[in-house]
Image (spheres, rainbow, N blue to C red):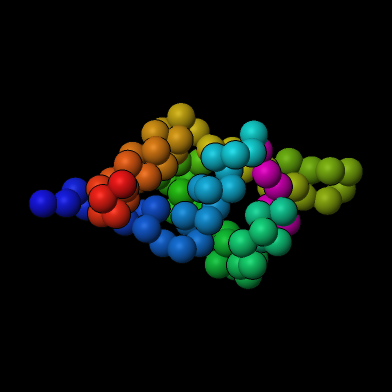
Amino acid sequence: MFQPLDPLLHSELRLAVMSLLISEEEAEFPYIKEQTGATAGNLSVQLDKLSTAGYIEVEKTFKGKKPCTICRITPAGQKAFEDYIQVLKTYLNV
């Protein structure tokens, strides 16, 4: 019997964000938007879900007078991502 996949990470956009952040120390909102092809509104909603779960931290700052949103994966997010990959491997018989 298979373990269930984390439903929070099993969303295409949230998984893309986590995959991006797992390899980057931090990433700004426009970069994540560009890399994922998401709309700003949808990305904001998904980042909020990941942040609420404690998988990422979102820092809102300013660059000069322009707002700047920086995202970082948390230790809990890193563990959730690694667990997700391990469970996914069981589905693939890897």
What residue sits 58% from the left and 43% below the top?
Answer: 21
What residue sits 50% from the left and 62% below the top?
Answer: 13
Q: Is residue 57 visible?
A: no
What residue sits 83% from the left and 51% below the top?
Answer: 66
**Residue 24 location, quadrant:** top right
Camera-side residue of 40 and 25: 25
**Residue 54 location, quadrant:** top left
Looking at this view, name the residue that lies furthest to the front. 94
Residue 63 falls left or right of residue 86:
right
Q: Range of the magenta residues?
A: 26-30
- Name the spot of residue 47 as percent of width and height, x first: 53, 53
What residue sits 45% from the left and 35% below the top?
Answer: 78
- Name the spot of residue 90 as percent of width and height, x first: 25, 48
Q: Is residue 90 visible?
A: yes
Looking at this view, name the residue that lies furthest to the right. 64
Camera-side residue of 39 and 23: 23
- Name the spot of residue 53 as percent of width and height, x first: 39, 44
Residue 49 falls left or right of residue 60:
left
| 38 relative to 52, above or below | below
- The count of marks equals 0
Query: Is 37 included in the stretch rendered in magenta?
Result: no
Camera-side residue of 61 and 73: 73
Looking at this view, name the residue that lies furthest to the top. 75
- Name the spot of residue 31 as percent of width and height, x first: 72, 53
